Amino acid sequence: MSRRQHQNAQEEMAGNANPPIEFKADHAAVVCVLHPAVAPDAPDLAPNEALTKLQTTLLEEVARNPGISYRDLASSLERNETTIMRNLQKLKKAGILQRTGSHKAGQWVILKRQKT
């Protein structure tokens, strides 16, 4: 790839929403480096947004039993497992909750308390 082709390719990619691509050329080869795109989506919970009653209850359950599973949470709260997973995902995206360890023997960790 010539220097001009390299420059044209980078200019074309500059306005593209896809992950940026960087071309590095030397005498022997051309290397194409894909840089991961930074997701522009905002967290599901704003920094000062109050938690829902379910999310507050989930945090209380997790504080009581850090090793609790999705299935056990759904059963104890009489909610669908998908609803539990979706709300836990929102808490994780907001930086309030984290799952550490394996899926089977992992633990929930509350990273910060949120206004209720």
Image (cartoon, grey):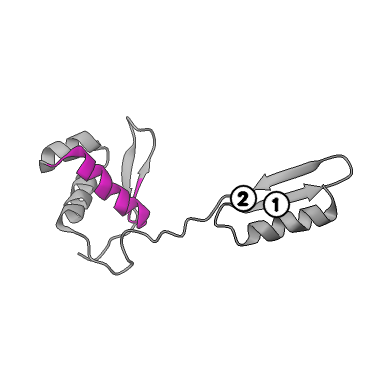
Is 80 rendered above or below residue 88?
above
Asked if the residue at tag 1 contacts the one at tag 2, i.e. Cβ–Cβ closer than 8 Å, the answer is yes
Residue at the right extreme? 27
Residue at x 25% of width, y 49% of height: 87
Q: Tell me the quarter of the image containing the C terminus.
A: bottom left
Q: Nearer the viewer, residue 89 or 97?
A: 89
User: For the magenta stretch, what is the residue range?
Assistant: 79-98
Q: Residues within 10 Å of mark 2 (few under 14, many from 20)?
A: few
Q: Quarter-wise, where is residue 100 in the image?
A: top left
Q: How many marks?
A: 2
At 20% across and 44% down in the image, what residue appears? 83
What residue occupies the far bottom of the structure in this picture? 48
Find numbered disc 1 in the image and state the secondary structure of the residue it sits on.
strand
Checking the image for residue 35, the label placed there is: 2
Query: Which amino acid type is shown beneath numbered disc 2?
Result: His
Amino acid on which the number 1 mark rests in the picture: Glu
- Dominant secondary structure (helix, strand or loop) of the stretch shown in magenta: helix
- Residue 3, which numbered label? none
Q: Which mark, residue 22?
A: 1
**Residue 109: image location, x then y, percent:** 33, 48
Q: Residue furthest left?
A: 78
